[in-house]
Image: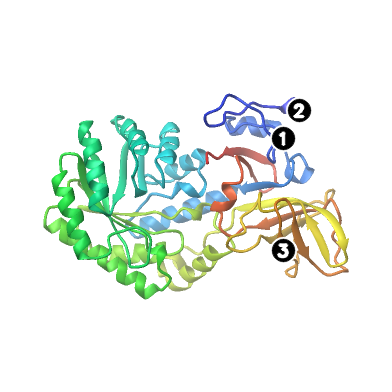
Amino acid sequence: MLTDSISVQTPGAASTQFNKGLHFFSGALEPAEVKRLGWNLLREDLSLPSAALYEEKLAHNLEWMRRFAVEYGAKLAPHGKTTMSPQLFARQLQHGAWGITLATAQQTLVAWQHGVRRVLMANQLVGKENMRIVSSLIEDPGFEYFCLVDSADQIHQLGSFFSARGQRLPVLVELGVTGGRTGVRDEEQLKSVLDALSAWRDALLLSGVEVYEGVLADEAAIRAFLQRAIDVTRRLASDKRFQRAPVLISGAGSAWYDVVAEAFSAAGFESGIEIVLRPGCYITHDVGAYREAQSRILSSKPVARQMHSGLVPALHVWAYVQSRPEPGTAIIGMGKRDAAFDAGFPVPALHFRPGDSLPKVAPAHWTITKMMDQHAFLHLSAQDDLRVGDMLAFDISHPCLTFDKWRAMPILNEQYEVVDVIQTWF
């Protein structure tokens, strides 16, 4: 299919051609142009292994999370590090997202270059080059940016840098827990942070309070942490510490977003405080920890139950059966370079033999037992009908670490036709 060779722009490089699952293609193509190529995964038009997304399931997840946030009166700033795909950022924004959450200055630059105009960087901004990147971006009057602060040292560094440039940087105070990650641990540290912010009021705009509850595993501890954030936000608002209206209070990774939404919504904030939720993995979901979290949400939250359905996995990694060396073993042409394995091995979901009409559900006893760089060991029964050249689709746990292995992914419709191609910018 070299006649369908298309150039692709990669970050910081000239136009190049590459083959990573889809022959040669470009994320710059419009969906209509991709459709005209006529590629179909079941017809073996794609080079496998390949990660693939599903259009109808993506659309379902986007709408589900939009409705969930609306029910709680919250805004969405999905964590973009999950996909690092500007095309998916655009779809999230089109579905009502308030902004995009990112983790680094470089990620923020990528988002800005692709038209994102509000970023909550859920991280500390440290280092002169990172500050220079952000400084250049906030020169754009149409771009709004926030980062986190949790120490006087960091605040003095930011204040000195942005003051010298005559700029004002919006910041959120991050609260943390003992033994956790970043964030203010106690009242003494909070006082030092607030004192430092007072010294740099002309350069740093205190805009709200942020937490990341995912460092805790117990719901009771999470609720106590969220209540602390509510109390601090109310106190600082009462003391007129904030320099932005509305004030932001933000939390929620992909596992406990329901608890955060419920707690912040139940706090009964006045109209001058805006709730911002930051789940990222919902757009593709998974079959591991996030599926378990979704089961908990659907069983315990009336709002989710009223929506009649939950999030659905929208990401597969497809691969060929490469060898049947022993009766109970198949070697699959997919490895650690192709799929996440940190939160559990991929799970066989679909089995397709080229020439058949549609895939079948993979038997429940088929199990990946080991992964190498480019190979996976599949355990099965000796009598199972699985041949070299058969295609398997695998459900994934922890989508973040699958997305970052692919520079591009096809989006498939229900007929397994390629209807679009996304690029990632890791």
- Say whether residue 420 is left or right of residue 390: left
Residue 119 against residue 307 in the figure, above or below: above
Picture quarter containing residue 213?
bottom left
The location of residue 128, given as percent across then percent down, is 33, 37
Name the element at disc 3. Answer: strand
> Which residue position holds label 2?
2
The label number, if any, that marks residue 368 in the structure image = 3
- Mark carried by residue 23: 1
Q: Amino acid at mark 3?
A: Ile
Residue at the image point whose x is 70% and y is 46% from the top: 416
From the viewer's perspective, is 93 left or right of 7?
left
Residue situated furthest left in the rendering: 239
| Front position among marks 3 and 1 | 3
Position of residue 8 in the picture relative to residue 425 (left or right): right
Find the distance from the CA under tag 2 to the CA under tag 3: 34 Å
Quarter location, residue 397: bottom right
Residue 52's disc number: none
Q: Secondary structure at mark 2?
A: helix
| Labels 3 and 1: the sequence-earlier one | 1
How would you rate the neighbour count of disc 3 (Cα within 10 Å): few for under 14, some for 14-19, many for 20 or more?
A: many
